[in-house]
Image (tube, grey):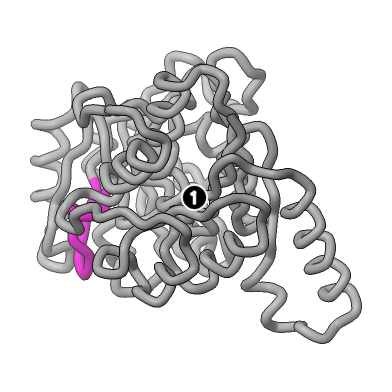
């Protein structure tokens, strides 16, 4: 059985789709998936054994240079790759007009959420078959339900498995240069919006609290703004290391060796959850019950702006075996 997934972005949403693939592979052993998504996240589907091919697109970049000949060539290549195969099922796991349009380009019957349950209701008119899945479920559980209804199998919420740990065990994954017995935390300080971020001063205080237990702190970053923030935080104490520029897979290797992760609402918090690393996530404008880092060893703190480093450290100490 051949299935196309359309889940374009963002990092946390892409990671949150993985358990549905694991469910499907467990129920239908011969199933395989192709996945259409934004080019920045093409590493992620390759971690899962059920994924056969990844079809990258660059909608965010193409919008800026729509009439450039190179852009037109890339769009044509994407369209050609999308239509190379015939699919038994096409699942729009994103639920937006843009993802529904991508699904419509592919060869196969399109499936998605119903009008009252999809993120952009008009997207449902593009689907051949639509399913009612309650909005009050966590987004990962909603996707697991969508896949099970589309592919006609049963699943239960207590069998959550992102299906990617084997990749990191069996593959030669680049890791940090730390000694194997080094004890450290990863602070995921960057987010897509400023109102999801915690202040530099509070991160500095938290790093100093980590030092009292002999823990080092590692700071990943993905752009110049995050790099500048990481350098400022690192000035607080000698136990903080700003990591070099890394791929998503390389950062996953760092997270795998960590004693724990402290994160704001961002994709690498979801990655830590998928890797089953103890993670404390701080939320402000978003609701973790519907879309927070999801899985084993996950702790949430809300009202992020009102959280002091001492409050976070107290929760951290009671939640993690550090």
Residue occupying the point 67% across, 81% down: 63
Residue 297: give x, y in percent of width and height. 22, 30
User: What residue is shown at x 43% (from left), y 28% (from top)?
Assistant: 24
Q: Quadrant of the C terminus?
A: top left
Q: Is residue 165 visible?
A: yes
- Let me know if residue 176 is in the magenta part: no
Few, some or many C-alpha atoms within 10 Å of disc 1 (few <14, some 14-19, many ≥20)? many
Q: In terms of image quadrants, where is residue 48?
A: top right
Residue 24 vs 130, above or below: the answer is above
Q: Is residue 149 above or below residue 176?
A: below
Residue 69 location, quadrant: bottom right
Q: Left of 39 or right of it: where is 317?
A: left
Q: Residue 267: x percent and y percent?
A: 42, 51
Q: How many marks?
A: 1
SS class of the residue under badge 1? strand
Q: Nearer the viewer, residue 182 or 226?
A: 226
Q: Residue at x 43, y 14 (%)?
A: 181
Q: Is residue 240 left or right of residue 242?
A: left
Q: Position of residue 178 (x, y in %)?
A: 53, 25
Magenta-drawn segment:
281-292
Q: Which residue is mark 1?
A: 91
């Amino acid at each position: 059985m051949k299935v196309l997934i359309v889940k374009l972005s963002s990092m946390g949403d892409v990671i949150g789709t993985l358990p549905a693939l694991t469910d499907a592979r467990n129920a239908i052993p011969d199933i395989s998936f192709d996945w259409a998504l934004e080019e920045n996240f093409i590493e992620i589907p390759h971690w899962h054994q059920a994924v056969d091919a990844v079809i990258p697109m660059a909608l965010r970049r193409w919008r800026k240079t729509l009439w450039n000949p190179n852009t037109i060539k890339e769009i044509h290549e994407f369209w050609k790759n999308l239509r190379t195969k015939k699919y038994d099922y096409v699942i729009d796991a994103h639920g937006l007009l843009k993802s529904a349009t991508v699904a419509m380009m592919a060869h196969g019957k399109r499936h998605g959420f119903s009008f009252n349950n999809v993120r952009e209701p008009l997207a449902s008119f593009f689907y051949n078959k639509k399913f009612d899945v309650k909005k009050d479920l966590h987004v990962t559980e909603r996707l697991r339900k969508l896949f099970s209804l589309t592919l006609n199998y049963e699943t239960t919420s207590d069998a959550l498995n992102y299906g990617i740990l084997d990749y990191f065990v069996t593959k030669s994954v680049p890791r940090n240069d730390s000694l194997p017995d080094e004890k450290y935390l990863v602070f995921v300080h960057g987010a897509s919006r400023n109102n999801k971020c915690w202040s530099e001063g509070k991160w500095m205080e938290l790093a100093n609290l980590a030092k009292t237990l002999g823990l080092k702190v590692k700071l990943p970053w993905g752009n110049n703004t995050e790099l500048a923030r990481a350098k400022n935080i690192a000035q607080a104490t000698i136990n903080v290391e700003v990591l070099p520029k890394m791929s998503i897979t390389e950062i996953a290797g760092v997270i795998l060796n960590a004693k724990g992760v402290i994160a704001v609402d961002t994709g690498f918090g979801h990655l830590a959850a998928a890797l089953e690393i103890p993670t404390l996530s701080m939320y402000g404008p978003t609701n973790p019950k519907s879309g927070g880092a999801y899985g084993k060893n996950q702790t949430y703190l809300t009202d992020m702006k009102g959280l002091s480093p001492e409050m976070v450290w107290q929760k951290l100490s009671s939640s993690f075996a550090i």
